[in-house]
Image: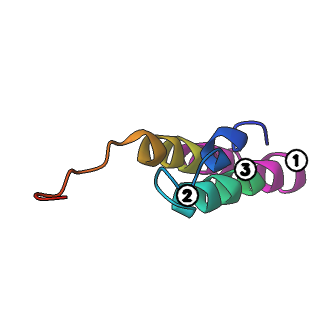
Amino acid sequence: MFTVIPLGFQAERRRGFGPLVLGCCGAVGVLVSKFWLDVNVGTYAAVGLIIVASLWNLWPHRVKNGH
């Protein structure tokens, strides 16, 4: 769950809450697939969601002309 905290830090100023929600879904997916269902493919897919959320959060904003 600690991997999701940076996604929420100043979310309004960065990419909004989309990466935070995606990261939370990934974190819950890791917990469910690893410890409840014991499905390795689900664990890897959930970790992939966390990685995508982190990259989405790090991706720079486009600068609009005139603004």
Q: Is residue 40 visible?
A: yes
Name the image quarter holding the N terminus: top right
Q: CA distance from mark 2 to mark 3?
A: 21 Å
Q: SS of the residue at dot 2?
A: loop
Rounded to the nearest whole Å, what is the CA distance between mark 1 and mark 2? 32 Å
Circle 1/circle 2 CB separation < 8 Å = no
Residue 52 screen position, x and y as percent: 47, 47
Which residue is found at the position 72% from the left and 42% from the top? 5
Quarter occupied by the C terminus: bottom left
Main SS class of the magenta portion in the image: helix
Is tag 2's residue or tag 3's residue first in the polypeptide sequence?
2
Numbered disc 3: secondary structure: helix
10 vs 29: above or below: above
Report the front residue among 44 and 20. Answer: 20
Horizontally, residue 11 falls left or right of residue 3, namely left
Q: Position of residue 19 (x, y in %)?
A: 54, 55
Q: Nearer the viewer, mark 1 or mark 2?
A: 2
Mark 1 and mark 2 lie on one chain; the one further toward the N terminus is: 2
| Residue picked out by circle 3 | 27
- Residue at x 67% of width, y 60% of height: 25
Q: Which mark is residue 35?
A: 1
Q: Is residue 24 left or right of residue 65?
A: right
Answer few, some or many: residues within 10 Å of disc 1's Cα (few below 14, many 20 plus, some between 14 and 19).
few
Q: Amino acid at mark 2?
A: Glu
Which residues are the magenta region? 30-48
Q: Which residue is mark 2?
A: 12
Q: Position of residue 26 (x, y in %)?
A: 66, 53
Residue 50: % across, % down: 59, 45
Compare residues 40 and 49 and report the one nearer the observer. 49
**Structural crowding at the residue carrying mark 3, measured as other residues with C-alpha within 10 Å and reported as few (<14), some (14–19) or many (≥20):** many
Q: Amino acid at mark 1?
A: Phe
Task: Kindly indicate whether the residue at mark 1 contacts the one at mark 3 (C-beta within 8 angstroms).
Answer: no
